[in-house]
Image (cartoon, rainbow, N blue to C red):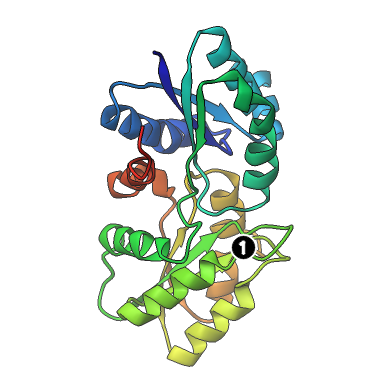
Amino acid sequence: MKKAILFASFGVINEQARKNCIDAAARQIEAAFPEFTLRQAYTSVFIRKKLAEQGTHMDSLSEALDGLVADGFTEVIIQPGYLTAGEEYEKKVLQVIEPYRQKFDRLLISRPLMECPADGADMLAVLQEIFPLEAGEDLVLVGHGSPHQHNPAYENLQADADKAGFPAHIGVIEPTDTPDFAAVLARLQAKGAKNILLAPLLLSGGAHVNEDIAGAEAESWLSRLQAAGFSVKVSLKGLGEYPAFQKLYVKRLQEWDF
């Protein structure tokens, strides 16, 4: 019986970010489940196209599943790389796998890292470990958000942080989603915060980190926070670079009996 874990992430164009974040998280999964073959897929058409132009091929989810069928795998579990169950998860994972359910003896889909309200506690513990704040420093974390519907995962994480007394403030890049920049700014001003550590709530670095979060343009989160009078330090690392975060994927997979 041949078994595989398929790590399906949005993907990233930058080679170093790919190695440091996505590939590193995949290696953590592979080490935890040595009886499984580990394969990857990128769900973003744009990123796969850009990588192909650079001479790098990455399978789509359907291509990866077709390859597993062709190679005789009978049991497959898909671990999404996404933090939340947003549009990409619904359209590029859940809808894609349906035609494949009859092609394997067992095809399972694991959960995004913050799908359920209780998942916020896991994420908060990781954030507290990887962001040891200095006295008087507040952490601003910027996730992606989703354009198709609001996801309460960010508010759940914020509530967990507030309850624990951890000075983190959660926002999203997607302009149609919340908590937006205005909401985070209002929290910071109400608290009287002065010193900020700005970091991505994203699996990997790349354009969102270098442009939307920490870019030099006036509309980046960094520029707007500085314009509002805050002293801002920036972490450019995707969460996938941290072993403590990588282990959350292992924990999700361990929820399954396989």
Other residues around mark 1 within 10 Å, as few (<14) / some (14–19) / many (≥20)? many
Indicate whether 118 appears above or below 80.
below
Nearer to the camera, 123 or 197:
123
Residue 35 coordinates in the image, percent (x, y): 30, 21
The residue under label 1 is: 220
- Residue 210 position within the rendered picture, expressed as x and y whole percent measured from the top left: 55, 50
Residue 243: percent from left, percent from top: 29, 44
Viewport quadrant of the N terminus: top left
User: Position of 156 compared to 132: left or right?
Assistant: right
For image coordinates 70% across by 32% down, the residue present is 45
Outermost residue on the top side: it is 71
Q: In this figure, what is the number of numbered marks?
A: 1
Does 35 sit above or below residue 22? Answer: above
The quadrant in which residue 97 appears is: top right
Residue drawn where x is 52% and y is 73% of the image: 155
Quarter where residue 31 is shown: top left
Horizontally, residue 139 falls left or right of residue 66, namely left
**Residue 54 visible to the viewer:** no
- Of 99 and 4, nearer the camera is 99
Q: Residue at x 53, y 15 (%)?
A: 68
Q: Nearer the viewer, residue 92 or 52?
A: 92
Mark 1 residue type: Ser
| Residue 25 visible in the snapshot | yes
Rendered view: 71 above or below 243? above
In the image, residue 89 sits, relative to residue 181, either above or below, namely: above
Q: Residue 112: x, y in percent?
A: 50, 49
